């Protein structure tokens, strides 16, 4: 499934800035950054639950916000992109 993950982490404290970096690292384990706090992830059901659990344990629900948008159908039918920064083709060959 394709999921769009967005978060808004309060960075007024040192701990908040750490949470922000940690949230980004978690999201990068599952997808690609498309905006500063927006990630496209292509995951199966188990990976989705793991992503959600890791992010929920990272954020402070009293000061931060976290959203998951499940995209139905293919990403190409939902996403139009203009400008720089190529995206990863999750269905293409993986070169490491």
Image (cartoon, rainbow, N blue to C red):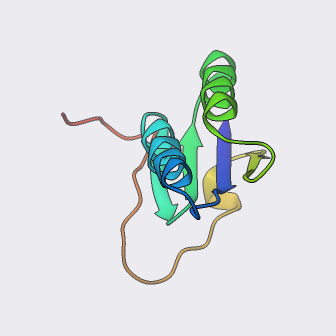
Q: Assign the N terminus to one quadrant of the image.
A: top right
- In this rendered view, identify the residue nearer to me: 55 or 1: 55
63 is higher (above) or lower (below) than 41: below
- In this rendered view, identify the residue nearer to me: 10 or 78: 10
Q: Is residue 91 left or right of residue 44?
A: left
25 is higher (above) or lower (below) than 9: above
Q: Is residue 63 left or right of residue 38?
A: right
Q: Position of residue 30 (x, y in %)?
A: 49, 35
Count of number-bearing discs: 0
Q: Residue furthest left?
A: 96
Q: Position of residue 63 (x, y in %)?
A: 75, 53
The image quarter in which residue 48 lies: top right
Q: Residue placed at 65% from the left, 28% from the top?
A: 57
Q: Position of residue 68 (x, y in %)?
A: 75, 45
Q: Residue placed at 56% from the left, 52% from the top?
A: 16
Q: Residue furthest bottom?
A: 83
Q: Is residue 91 left or right of residue 45?
A: left
Q: Residue placed at 62% from the left, 21% from the top?
A: 50
- In this rendered view, identify the residue nearer to me: 33 or 94: 33
Q: Residue placed at 39% from the left, 52% from the top?
A: 88
The image quarter in which residue 93 lies: top left
Q: Assign the C terminus to one quadrant of the image.
A: top left
């Amino acid at each position: 499934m394709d999921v769009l993950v967005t978060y808004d982490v309060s960075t007024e404290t040192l701990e908040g800035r750490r949470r922000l970096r940690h949230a980004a690292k978690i999201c990068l384990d599952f997808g690609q950054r498309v905006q500063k706090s927006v990630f496209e992830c292509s995951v199966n059901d188990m990976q989705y639950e793991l992503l959600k659990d890791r992010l929920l344990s990272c954020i402070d629900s009293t000061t931060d916000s976290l959203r998951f948008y499940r995209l139905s159908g293919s990403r190409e039918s939902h996403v139009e992109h203009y400008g720089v920064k190529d995206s990863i083709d999750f269905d293409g060959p993986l070169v490491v």
